[in-house]
Amino acid sequence: MRQFLILLIKFSLPLFIIGALITGTYFYYDPFKVVRDYPDYYCSVVGLNEDYIATERYLKSRTHEHYNSFILGSSRAGSGFDVHHWQMKLGKDAHAFSYAASNESLFGMYGKLRLIDEKGDSIKNVLLVICSDVTFSTTKNSTGHLFIKHPLVSNESEKYFQEVNLKGYIFTGFFIPYLDYKIFKTQRPYMVDFLKFKLTSDTVIYPPFLASYKESVIRKNEFDYYKNTPFYKRTEIVPPYHKQIFSAEQVLLKNIYNLFQKHHTNYKIIISPLYNQQPINNEDLNALYHIFGKDRVFDFSGKNSITDNKLNYYEFSHYRFHVGDSILNRIYTSTDSTVHTVENF
C-alpha cells in the first residue's frame, strides 16, 4: 500500500502542477473575456459569448443611454435587424438596444426582460424574434462556454458560470491552440477549428455577430462572396417543425407577456424566415396568437419570396439586414390585415 501511494503521488503530482498551470493561464489571459471587467470588447481570435457581451454592454451603458426598446432573439435577430433602423420606426423618445444572443432561448429572453425590469428600466418597445430551430430548444440555462447565459440573466451563480468557461478552456483542448498562438504568434492549420483569424484587431470594437463586417465584404464583391459561400440544396416540399410549445414553454411565454403588460410594451413577435424553409408548427403559431394576440405575431417562416432567394442570406443560417428592414417596413407601416401572412410579403 505504501509503495502504491508513493507511485500515485509520483505520477499525480506532475499532473496536478500541469493542471494548475493551465488553470492559471485561464485566469491570467482571460481568453473568453469573462474574468475581468472591460470597457468594451474588441475583435479577437477567440469566439466570444454574445450573451455575456450584450449583457455587459447593456449594464455599462444603460444609465446614460436610457434604453427603453429592445431587440430579443438569436443571432438571426442580431444580424438581421439593424437596431438603428428599428429605432427610427419607434419615434423620437425611443432608445433601442439589440439584446440578441447566439442560440437564444425563451429562457434567455425572459431572463433578459426580467433583468431589465429589475434594474428599473422601461420596456417601451420590444421586437421579439423567434427562430423555430433554437428558440424552443431549452427552458433552462444553455450549456457550453459560448452559450451559457450571463449570471444576471440566468439567476445562477458566478462560480458556476466560471466553472463552465474554465471547462470549455481545458477539456475541449482549446488551451493548446490558444497558448500556441498567444506565445508564438503563428497561425497553424490545426488552429482553424478553435481560433478565428479573418477579423482580428485590438482597436476595432467587436460588432455583434460580425454582421456589418459581412455586409462590407458583400458590397465589395457580391459575386465572389456567394461563389465562395456554400448553400445546400433544399427540397421542394418541406414539412413544418414538430410541436414545441408545451407547459414549460407556456410558462415562459406567459411570464414574458406579463412583463409586457406591466410595462405597457408595444411589442411585435417575428417568426424568422429561415433558409431551411420549414414553417413553424401550426399549433405553436396558434399558441403564440393565443398568448400575445394575433395582431402582434408575424409569421415569415416557410417557403416564400424571402426564403427562396439565397442573396437574402449571409450563409445558410443568417438572413441579411435588408431582409430585416423589409420586415420592419411591412409590420410598422402597413394597416393591411394580410401583413401577418407571409404569402403577401
Image: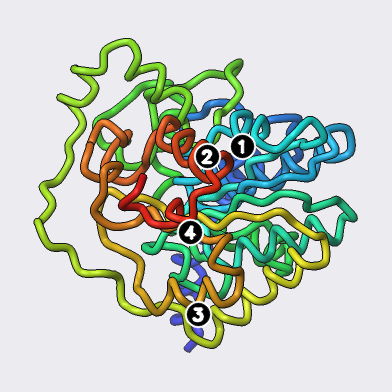
Marks 3 and 2: which is nearer the front? 2
Identified by mark 4, the residue type is Ile
**Helix, strand or loop at disc 3?**
helix
Question: Measuring 68% from the left and 47% from the top, which residue is drawn there?
Answer: 70
> Which image quarter is the C terminus in?
top left
The x, y position of residue 37, in whole percent, is 76, 39
Q: Which residue is mark 2?
A: 328
Residue 222 appears left or right of 336:
left
Report the residue marked by disc 1. 29
Q: Residue 344 at x, y = what percent?
A: 34, 48
The crowding category of the residue bearing disc 2, from other C-alpha atoms within 10 Å (few below 14, some 14 to 19, many at least 20), is some
Location of mark 3 (residue): 5
Separation of residues labelled 3 and 4 (CA atoms) = 57 Å
Badge 1 density bin: few <14, some 14–19, many ≥20, Cα 10 Å = few
Question: Earlier along the polypeptide chain: callout 3 or callout 4?
Answer: 3
Counting residues from the N terminus, which is met first, the one under dot 1 or under dot 4? Answer: 1
Query: What residue does disc 4 label?
Result: 130
Q: Nearer the viewer, residue 40 or 133?
A: 133
Query: Could you tell me how far apart the alpha carbons at marks 1 and 4 are, in whole angstroms?
Result: 36 Å
Q: Disc 3 and disc 1: Cα gap in Å?
A: 35 Å
The residue tagged with tag 2: helix, strand or loop?
helix
**Mark 3 / mark 1, whichever is N-terminal:** 3
Q: Nearer the viewer, mark 1 or mark 4?
A: 4
Q: Amino acid type of disc 2?
A: Leu
Inter-mark Cα distance, 2 to 1? 42 Å
Between disc 4 and disc 2, whose residue precedes?
A: 4
| Amino acid type of the residue tagged 1 in the rendering | Tyr
Q: Nearer the viewer, residue 16 or 261?
A: 261
